[in-house]
């Protein structure tokens, strides 16, 4: 299993608007294709004005297939357009990680 950890940084004062936009327009098409995230949270200390979500996939091929389907979804494209128009996001960091043998995430 692999994990895709995504950290997004918002302009100060815009994170709530970005999360509301995602909840209204992005969550349904994203979870339709990717399933439920392992983790989705806002940062309290450290890199403030940021949120993190982690998605689990069987392997790189599973990730590529699911993300391609999501990107082809017209509803996801609506969300991306609205997110771009909002202009809250200023940085994105992605990390692909492998689970360790002694810890298995329950899906």
Image (spheres, rainbow, N blue to C red):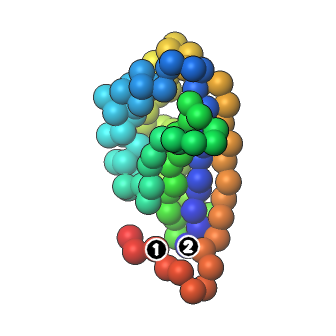
The percent position of residue 80, horizontal first and vertical second, equals 50, 26
- Determine if residue 3 is in view: yes
Q: Residue at x 31, y 28 (%)?
A: 24
Whichever of callouts 1 and 2 sits on the residue coming sooner in the sequence is 2
- Dot 2 falls on a residue whose secondary structure is loop
Which residue is drawn at the image coordinates 57% and 86% (left, top)?
Answer: 102
- Residue 4: x and y in percent read 59, 56
Relative image position of residue 51 (x, y in whole percent): 52, 40
Above or below: residue 41 compared with residue 11: below
Q: Could you tell me how far apart the alpha carbons at marks 1 and 2 are, in whole angstroms?
A: 9 Å
Q: Quadrant of the C terminus?
A: bottom left
Tell which of 30 and 98 is nearer to you: 98
As helix, strand or loop, the secondary structure at mark 1 comes to loop
The disc at residue 59 is: none
Q: Nearer the viewer, residue 50 or 63?
A: 50
- The 10 Å Cα crowd at callout 1, few under 14, some 14 to 19, many 20 or more, is few
Q: Is residue 98 above or below residue 26?
A: below
Label 1–label 2 contact, CB within 8 A:
yes
Q: How busy is the neighbourhood of tag 2: few (under 14 within 10 Å), some, or many (20 plus)?
A: some
> Looking at this view, is 48 or 31 the one in front?
48
Q: Residue at x 65, y 24 (%)?
A: 90
* Farthest residue, direction top: 85
Task: Give the vertical position of 81 relative to 47 (above or below).
Answer: above
Percent across and percent down for residue 95 are: 68, 54
- Indicate left or right for 86 with 106 as reference: right
Q: Quarter of the image holding residue 87?
A: top right
Q: Quadrant of the N terminus?
A: bottom right
Residue bearing the label numbered 1: 105
Q: Nearer the viewer, mark 1 or mark 2?
A: 1
Image point 56% across, 30% down: which residue?
49
- Residue for badge 2: 1
């Amino acid at each position: 299993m692999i994990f895709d950890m995504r950290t997004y940084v918002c302009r100060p004062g815009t994170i709530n608007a970005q999360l509301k936009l995602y909840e209204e327009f992005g969550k349904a098409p994203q979870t339709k294709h990717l399933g439920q995230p392992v983790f989705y949270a806002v940062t309290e200390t450290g890199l403030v004005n940021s949120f993190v979500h982690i998605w689990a996939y069987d392997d790189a091929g599973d990730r590529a297939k699911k993300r391609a389907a999501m990107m082809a979804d017209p509803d996801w494209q609506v969300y991306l357009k609205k997110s771009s128009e909002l202009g809250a996001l200023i940085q994105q960091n992605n990390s692909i990680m492998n689970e360790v043998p002694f810890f298995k995430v329950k899906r």
